[in-house]
Image (cartoon, rainbow, N blue to C red):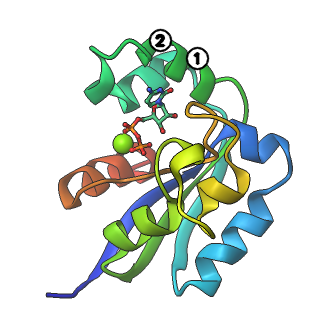
């Protein structure tokens, strides 16, 4: 089954800092995604902790939250047919070393933590994550 979906994408601090935002946005557009909302923000560690609450029990949680709040990020709502899975495919594996040729993480990711982009992993999480950043 296919349907038009929305998903949340984040260009993480490592990529914003290296001025890769426009290049990454153009990759989304080339691959048929529409960027229907976007903003450049810097979040607090507390906000990062809330956003990544599902990873609360993981050993990398603290560093992950420090990292996501360490510099400006670009949060975007992307839309496309089956956007959630399509974005996950375009991003590539969490660890850039395992990411498939041509994926964003393979191209730009520096390490498993500084992997340049975030993407929602399910319909339910996409909804929650879009609300988190774009509910005003
Ligand atoms: O981002 P993705 O959904 O691919 O991976 P995740 O398992 O949901 O983990 C969220 C984020 O935590 C990753 O994107 C990495 O930035 C970070 N992470 C980490 O620093 N060390 C790990 N062993 C796993 C994830
Ligand atoms: Mg995830």
Q: Which mark is residue 62?
A: 2
* Label 2 residue SS: helix
Choose between 134 and 49: the one closer to the eye.
Answer: 49
- Residue 61 percent across, percent down from the top left: 42, 17
Q: In the rendered image, which residue does mark 1 sit on?
A: 66
Which quadrant of the render holds ligand 2?
Answer: top left
Mark 1 crowdedness (10 Å alpha carbons): few <14, some 14-19, many ≥20: some
Label 2 near label 1: C-beta < 8 Å? yes
Give the left or right position of residue 12, taking residue 51 as reference.
Answer: right
Q: Residue at x 61, y 54 (%)?
A: 105
Quarter of the image for residue 42 reads: top right
Give the left or right position of residue 76, taking residue 108 as reference.
Answer: left
In this view, 57 is above or below 79 = above
- Residue 46 percent across, percent down from the top left: 47, 16
- Residue 81 percent across, percent down from the top left: 34, 85
* Tally of marks: 2
């Amino acid at each position: 089954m296919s349907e038009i979906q929305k998903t949340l994408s984040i260009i993480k601090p490592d990529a914003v800092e290296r001025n890769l935002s426009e290049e990454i946005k153009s990759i989304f557009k080339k691959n048929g995604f529409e960027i229907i909302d976007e903003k450049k923000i810097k979040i607090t560690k507390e906000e990062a902790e809330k956003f990544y609450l599902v990873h609360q029990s993981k050993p990398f949680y603290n560093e992950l939250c420090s990292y996501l709040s360490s510099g400006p990020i670009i949060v975007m709502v992307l839309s496309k047919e089956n956007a959630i899975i399509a974005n996950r495919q375009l991003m590539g594996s969490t660890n850039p070393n395992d990411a498939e040729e041509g994926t964003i993480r393979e191209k730009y990711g520096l390490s498993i933590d500084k992997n340049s982009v975030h993407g929602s992993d399910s319909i339910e999480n996409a909804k929650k994550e879009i609300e988190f950043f774009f509910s005003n």
